[in-house]
Image (spheres, helix red, strand yellow):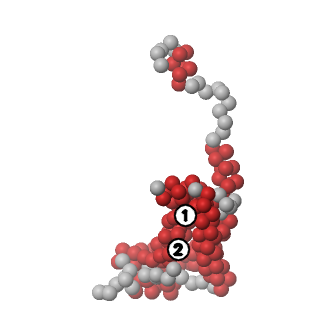
Amino acid sequence: MFNNWFRNNKAAMVLLTIVRIYVGYQWIEAGWHKLTGGFDAAGFLKGAIAKSVGEDASVQAWWGSFLQHAALPNVSFFNVLIPAGEFLVGLGLILGTFTTFAALMGLVMNASYLLSGTVSTNVQLLLMEAIIIVSAANAGKIGLDRWVLAYIRSLFHKKDNGSTLQPAASAQAMNRPV
């Protein structure tokens, strides 16, 4: 019931646009501060790894192991990926371009922050991103997705030029019952 409303209703489209722009603003602001103010994820990663050991661990051990053995050794990559990703997710959501994908990437980043032991506004943003994802194209109709997605669909769904045989026509051509 709610899924159909989110995907097809015009009032939902307006509400989703407000939510989408709010979430996009949160992401673009966070990304911009990291891009312009300098960003080093090493301290955050080390803090999350430290929270993954001991009796009162607030970070799952498997996630701490991933951070220690994959993320921390490649921190220079994450120092570029995180600010650029945050900024691009925000830009996509604000403009309504590839909205569902932008919300999905935002959800992945929020889940990563939550798994790392940071609460902040991540839970609220994650829930709003999930609603945007479930709403599919309706979340970006008041945005550039209206034209971008239509153009992409036109690339993959070319009109039939009449040269292909229809199943009924090919059965008749072979003198078989349909």
Query: On residue 73, which mark appears?
Result: none
Q: Residues within 10 Å of mark 2 (few under 14, many from 20)?
A: many
Q: Residue furthest left?
A: 55
Give the vertical position of 136 relative to 84 (above or below): above
Q: What separation in Å lies between label 1 and label 2 (alpha carbons)?
A: 10 Å
In percent of width and height, residue 162 lies at 66, 27
**Does any portion of residue 63 appear in the rendered image?**
yes
In the rendered view, does 122 fall on the left or right side of 141?
left
In percent of width and height, residue 87 lies at 63, 73
Q: Earlier in the sequence, mark 1 or mark 2?
A: 2
Q: Residues within 10 Å of mark 1 (few under 14, many from 20)?
A: many
Residue at 63%, 75% in the rendered image? 25
Residue at 58%, 24% in the rendered image? 165
Tag 1 secondary structure: helix
In the foreground, 159 or 41: 159
Residue at 65%, 86% in the rendered image? 37
Residue at 58%, 56% in the rendered image? 9
Give the vertical position of 137 relative to 83 (above or below): above
Q: What amino acid type should be assigned to the residue bearing mark 1? A: Ile
Query: On residue 125, which mark appears?
Result: 2
- Give the labeled residue for mark 1: 132
Q: Residue furthest top?
A: 175
In the foreground, 165 or 83: 165
In percent of width and height, residue 39 lies at 60, 83
In the foreground, 155 or 21: 21
Q: What amino acid type should be assigned to the residue bearing mark 2? A: Leu
**Does any portion of residue 98 appear in the rendered image?**
no
Tell me the quarter of the picture where residue 77 sits.
bottom right
Tag 2 secondary structure: helix
